[in-house]
Image: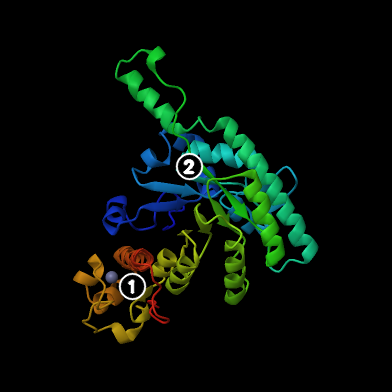
Amino acid sequence: MPVGTLASVKGVSQDVLEDLGVEILLSNTYHLFLRPGVETVRRMGGLHRFMSWDCAILTDSGGFQVFSLTDLRKVSEEGVAFRSHLDGSSHFLSPEKAMEAQIGLGADIIMAFDECTEYPADAARARASMELTVRWAERSKNYFEEHKHEVPWALKESAELRSAGRSRAAVPTRSEATQALFGIVQGGMDPELRRESADRTIDIGFPGYAIGGLSVGEPRELTREIVLSTLEHLPSDQPRYLMGVGTPDEIAQYAQSGVDMMDCVLPTRAARHGLLFTSEGKVSIKQARYAQDENALDPICDCRVCQRYSRAYLRHLYASNELLAQVLNTVHNLHFYLATMRTVRAWIRAGHAPAAGASQM
Ligand SMILES: [Zn+2]
């Protein structure tokens, strides 16, 4: 899932995302909550209509971003008080508030409000944090079940029917179609705590489960170990979502291990810094060695950038700080990530894993 933090994948318009074959993208509740505000998006009919995007959208709960505001937040049983990174204004997010916000934004998949345990954390702290996440998962689900029909597309449909001259009585005020709320497994870097978190989250009951609290500064090998051990405890017939991962190599490996969904800012953020993923490895397009390189960025890539432009031109755009550099770099990196996942899906469909070392990075 490409990341479109503020209802926009930075630098790439929705028609290009469609051409690239993006089927689902992620938006961040924390950022939209602050700007333009949930109420604005809700009145516009939800994220889909607001950003003109017919494919799927997933929103996170805001928890991860709020916990990243280390000096600006205070956690209690009730929720998290925090100050906006934009203007210092005070806000509060709780499981109920996070559900209200995500229902208002109207994504297809929304996430339970969890506490992302910091790394490193001692055993007592990791347990207390995991327990808090379980209690918050229960509160998230309770609120969701009571309010799940308040999705904004029902409101918009009603308004359209009214403007089309239909009587008020005929206007639906509740939508039959609801969102899918996923639970999140925490438990720090302790496989046993992870197992307990998975069991207790499954007991609450969700249509999909995420593995959270990873890629928070731990060694990559440890991430892998925790992911693999946690996957064993999650139902294989429901979506399993690994949050905030990873490099092209990693996403291929995790998908083969049973992960169904991943999101990462890496392809888009790296692109804006001139770091490009190719079949021949990483290319830092700012380097002078590409100044007169007439070759395509990636000789076997069939994206619109590689089909049309040379490394020399891309290097020139980047060195000149042209806006187009960010656009083209992002388009290529997104294509590379999506192509990686298409390859993995083909492997899975064919019923066999690729030979070791066949990954693209
Ligand atoms: Zn390309």
- Mark 2 to mark 1: distance in Å? 30 Å
The image quadrant of residue 349 is: bottom left
Q: Percent from the top left, x then y, of residue 353?
A: 41, 73
Q: Is the distance from the Cβ of mark 1 to the nearest ligand 1 atom less than 8 Å? A: no
* Front one among 349 and 93: 349
Dot 2, crowdedness within 10 Å: few (<14), some or many (≥20)?
Answer: few
Q: Percent from the top left, x then y, of residue 231?
A: 57, 62
Q: Residue at x 50, y 53 (%)?
A: 237
Left/right placement of residue 328 relative to residue 60 reads left
Circle on res. 36: 2
Is residue 93 visible in the rendered image? The answer is no
Tell me the amino acid under the disc marked 2.
Pro
Left/right placement of residue 92 relative to residue 176 reads right
Q: Secondary structure at mark 1?
A: helix
Q: Residue at x 67, y 60 (%)?
A: 195
Dot 1, crowdedness within 10 Å: few (<14), some or many (≥20)?
Answer: many
The image quadrant of residue 330 is: bottom left
Tell me the amino acid under the disc marked 1.
Tyr
Circle on res. 318: 1
